[in-house]
Image: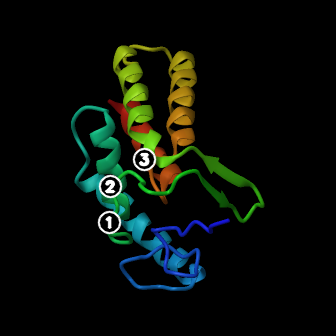
Amino acid sequence: MSVRVDPYCYPGTNVPVNNAGFRLQTELDLFEADAVLLAAASLNLSPITGQFDQARLLETHRRLFHPVYAWAGQLRQNTGRMAKLRESGRVISCGPSEHVPAALAAVFADLNEDRYLCELDATDLAERVGFYYSEIDAIHPFREGNSRTLRVFFPDLCRA
């Protein structure tokens, strides 16, 4: 039986390789929280524009996480199936990374067909946003930062 090495982590750890070089998860968590908060605030000064598609999702992730990770804005690769244990004890499991591009393409094709949720009343908008949010969250396109990226991406979509 072989042990799968996570290509995103420092060898022998579960700590993602990061721009600051932190090798302890607690230090990385503090750095990441501050860096992402500042990056999110800067989006108010320089918002992302353009179509609500995969490129925009990637740009949202890049803009939020580039201070922290060199691979910010890139789909996760070479992870196979992935599971992450949360502090709550909940395990997040997602499918193989090789399926991410096609799965995202299908979701964004559907979102396009739904006319990017334009002209929906509040109830229908909430239902459709919940649907698309959960679809992309289940795909888990990024190694880190999926939920935070979606929490920026979808309010932008609703304001458009």
Callout 2 touching callout 1 (CB < 8 Å): yes
Is 80 located above or below residue 131 in the figure?
A: below
Report the disc number at residue 66: 1
Q: Name the one closer to the observer, 12 or 134.
A: 12
Q: Position of residue 29 (x, y in %)?
A: 54, 74
Between marks 3 and 2 in the image, the one whose residue lies nearer the viewer: 2
First along the sequence among labels 3 and 2: 2
Q: Name the one closer to the observer, 4 or 35.
A: 4
Q: Quadrant of residue 87?
A: bottom right
Q: Quadrant of residue 154?
A: top left
Q: Residue at x 57, y 43 (%)?
A: 95
Looking at the image, residue 39 sits to the left or right of residue 48; the answer is right
Q: Name the one closer to the observer, 130 or 77.
A: 77
Report the disc number at residue 73: 2
Looking at the image, residue 160 sits to the left or right of residue 6; the answer is left
First along the sequence among labels 2 and 1: 1
- Per the image, the residue denoted by label 3 is 152
Residue type (three-letter) at the residue carrying disc 3:
Val
Is 27 located above or below residue 77 in the figure?
A: below
Q: Work out how far the residue at label 3 is from the one at label 2, CA to CA, in angstroms.
A: 14 Å
Q: Position of residue 129 (x, y in %)?
A: 51, 28
